[in-house]
Image (spheres, helix red, strand yellow):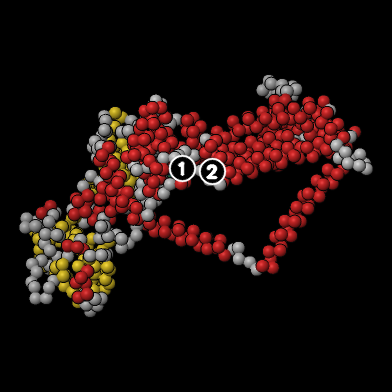
């Protein structure tokens, strides 16, 4: 061709921009050897900052004042109130996670697919829980679902109230994680491809979109679960003996036992994060996890 | 398998008209290309046909049945997308099987059809590979196989080859044509690559600004364009402003010289016309020869090597000669072996062979300041 068509020219321009970007990227890691000490120092510093309090906590918890002992931990684990609280917390966390995913995943899909215009609005709405203090949320929940509920439903005595509250509270994490996953695949194009092959909306969501965004959905689920497991304010204000509330109560009478439970809950969280990392690593390295799951 | 009719399709986005009064009938087993510059409405028309957009007015009819209101998933058409849109979580075989599963075909039948498709498209050895592990060409073939596995009434292809490199593209376009003929499938191909459109289509629809500019077979479009737009869009074309000297005699006049031109008999006496001549139809005049038709004299400015031919850009007239309408550029192709005779700066005389010259009416919108314009990419 003697003259490129406009389309070609645009593509070529695009590539040129990318090439420039790549060059910049290549130059960036070049640094003098003396400087490589600094990142190492930062990492060590951060590690100490994070680990020292944990060591202190553990050494306080697992001793009787002089010697190392597992007694505070075994005592705490044997407490029936611990069992009740952890069961309640886990139950609420599982329920909230399920409800959240069932609501957030299809909503996020539909927003990307059909209602792009309200995307910005959703971005804003879903971070509101960050800026609204839990006390306001509690009062609101009481107003809407309490004895004088305009909806005519009194949920104050039901853990379902907590599930509703926690759904809102974890929305910044769940929606963001799922929405990012939706942005990562070409939702619109894949949906059209699926429709062109005769599939309806549900089928497309189940067979194409869900497997494609599975990683984001798993992250959302884990984030939701851990958020709920550790939430104190809302449960306390609404009068539920969830695990964090129990922990707080125990601390007054038996600080060593409470502290040993903190270590336990840390470990639960770590297990969650580790699971997330493993799934992420496997999905990243050849997306095998994604495929098997699909 | 199917005959597709588009009747008076119009589509606006806001106050911008993307497609206007689009009328086209695609016959059973025919491959029709939509060709036109960026933004002329090719994709929009295709998406309306597929059911991803709905027209503001007009109707879509397949085999006599009006499907204008049907959603995409009920139209039974196949589509190959520009970026292929393969499902990343499914292997090549699973991608091909998807449409069959959606149609609830029995497992046995599905397996058989998938194997058949894999075989037909030479994908058997990569059946279990995921899209990310396939080459561009293999992805393209998988997308094609996935679309035709369900035996669609019409196959829609939106720039299916724009993502593969030039060498593979040529190979794949022949393959697309071969498969389309073999399966006897009715197809629309959207492209802005004229070589692609001209080489594999039964008919080409040239579009401009949402309208059909011209519909014709590739050779009609190339050799006998009916509009200035088509002439300048397809291949390289020399355009000379002429006047119709004698309608009855089929004569046109340029710079006081009268000569015969095809098409002059269709235009009113005294009206303006555009004389269209491809660079390959022009011939340098040998010294001492006396050509019959008009002769262009000038100096070679640039040589462009095109393979067996070399294109000379010749500036007509001389800088001192302002008697004609200033100087203008004319492209002429000469055999590369002989190109050495006309280095840049050399004087040259070019004859316009009478048979090759066609004249078309000048529309008000076609008027340009220069008398002769060489336009468009060169089509080969
Ligand atoms: N969803 C949309 N919203 C608004 N305008 C649109 C939309 N889709 C297309 N258009 C406009 O309609 C016109 C036709 O677009 P279309 O994509 O059909 O062009 P095209 O011929 O396929 O171009 P290209 O060769 O660049 O793909 C363009 O001006 C485009 O900006
Ligand atoms: Mg397009």
* Front position in the image: A37 or B9: A37
What residue sits right under mark 2 in the picture? A287
Where B94 sits versus B38, above or below? above
Instruction: Residue at 12%, 73% (x, y): give it.
Output: B286
Residue at 65% over, 32% down: A97
Q: Position of residue B105 (x, y in %)?
A: 39, 26
Q: Is residue A280 left or right of residue B333?
A: right
Q: Residue furthest right?
A: A66
- Tag 1's secondary structure? loop
Q: Which mark is residue B335?
A: none
Q: Residue furthest left?
A: B249
Q: Residue at x 35, y 32 (%)?
A: B113
- How far apart marks 1 and 2 lie (CA) works out to 10 Å
Q: Nearer the viewer, residue B29 or B178?
A: B178
From the viewer's side, name the closer residue of B264 and B124: B124
- Residue named by callout 1: B130
- Tell me if A60 is positioned left or right of A93 in this view: right
Pointers 1 and 2 in contact (CB under 8 A)? Answer: yes
Q: Position of residue B103 (x, y in %)?
A: 39, 28
Tell me if residue A14 comes above or below residue A155 in the rendering: below
Whole-percent x and y of residue A221?
Answer: 64, 36
Residue B177 location (% of width, % of height): 27, 45
């Amino acid at each position: 061709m003697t003259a490129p068509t406009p389309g070609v020219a645009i593509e070529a321009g695009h590539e040129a921009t990318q090439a420039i970007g790549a060059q910049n990227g290549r130059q960036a890691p070049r640094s003098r050897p003396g400087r490589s000490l600094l990142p190492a120092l930062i990492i060590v510093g951060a590690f100490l900052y994070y680990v020292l309090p944990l060591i202190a906590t553990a050494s306080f918890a697992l001793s009787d004042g002089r010697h190392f002992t597992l007694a505070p931990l075994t005592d705490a684990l044997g407490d029936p109130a611990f069992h009740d609280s952890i069961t309640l917390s886990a139950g609420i966390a599982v329920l909230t996670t399920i409800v959240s995913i069932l609501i957030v995943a299809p909503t996020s899909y539909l927003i990307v697919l059909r209602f792009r215009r309200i995307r910005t609005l959703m971005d804003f709405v879903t971070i509101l829980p960050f800026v609204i203090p839990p006390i306001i949320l509690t009062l609101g929940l009481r107003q809407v679902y309490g004895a004088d509920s305009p909806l005519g439903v009194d949920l104050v005595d039901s853990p379902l109230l907590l599930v509703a509250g926690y759904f809102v509270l974890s929305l910044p994490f769940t929606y963001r994680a799922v929405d990012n996953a939706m942005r990562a695949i070409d939702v619109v194009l894949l949906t059209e491809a699926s429709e062109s092959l005769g599939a309806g909306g549900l089928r497309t969501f189940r067979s194409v979109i869900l497997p494609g965004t599975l990683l984001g959905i798993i992250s959302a689920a884990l984030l939701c679960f851990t958020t709920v497991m550790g939430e104190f304010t809302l449960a306390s204000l609404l009068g539920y003996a969830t695990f964090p509330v129990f922990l707080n109560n125990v601390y007054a009478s038996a600080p060593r036992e409470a502290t040993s439970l903190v270590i336990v809950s840390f470990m639960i969280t770590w297990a969650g994060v580790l699971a997330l990392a493993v799934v992420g690593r496997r999905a990243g390295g050849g997306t095998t996890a994604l495929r098997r799951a699909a | 398998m199917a005959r597709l009719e588009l009747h008076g399709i119009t589509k606006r986005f806001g106050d911008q008209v993307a497609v206007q009064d689009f009328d086209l009938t695609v016959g059973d087993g025919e491959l029709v290309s939509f060709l036109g510059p960026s933004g002329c409405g090719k994709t929009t028309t295709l998406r309306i046909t597929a059911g991803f957009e709905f027209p503001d007015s007009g109707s879509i009819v397949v085999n006599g049945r009006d499907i204008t209101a049907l959603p995409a998933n009920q139209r039974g058409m196949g589509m190959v997308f520009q970026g292929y849109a393969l499902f990343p979580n499914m292997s090549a075989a699973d991608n091909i099987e998807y449409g069959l599963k959606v149609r609830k075909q029995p497992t046995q039948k599905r397996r058989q059809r998938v194997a058949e498709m894999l075989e037909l498209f030479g994908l058997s050895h990569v059946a279990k590979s995921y899209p990310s592990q396939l080459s561009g060409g293999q992805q393209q073939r998988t997308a094609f196989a996935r679309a035709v596995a369900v035996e669609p009434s019409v196959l829609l292809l939106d720039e299916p080859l724009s993502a593969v490199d030039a060498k593979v593209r040529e190979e794949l376009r022949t393959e697309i044509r071969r498969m389309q003929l073999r399966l006897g499938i009715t197809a629309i191909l959207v492209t802005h690559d004229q070589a692609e459109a001209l080489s594999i289509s039964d008919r080409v629809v040239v579009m401009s600004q949402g309208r059909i500019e011209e519909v014709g077979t590739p050779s009609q479009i190339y050799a006998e364009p009916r509009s200035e737009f088509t002439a300048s869009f397809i291949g390289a074309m020399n355009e000379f402003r002429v006047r119709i000297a004698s309608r009855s005699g089929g004569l046109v006049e340029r710079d006081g010289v009268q000569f015969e031109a095809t098409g002059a008999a269709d235009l009113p006496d005294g009206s303006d016309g555009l004389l269209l001549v491809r660079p390959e139809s022009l011939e340098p005049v040998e010294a001492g020869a006396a050509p019959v038709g008009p002769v262009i004299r000038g100096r070679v400015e640039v040589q462009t090597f095109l393979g067996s031919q070399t294109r000379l850009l010749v500036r007509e007239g001389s800088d001192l000669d302002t008697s004609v309408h200033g100087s203008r550029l004319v492209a002429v192709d000469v055999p590369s072996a002989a190109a050495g005779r006309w280095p840049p700066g050399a004087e040259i005389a070019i004859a316009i062979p009478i048979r090759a010259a066609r004249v078309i009416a000048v529309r008000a919108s076609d008027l340009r300041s220069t008398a002769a314009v060489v336009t468009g990419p060169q089509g080969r």
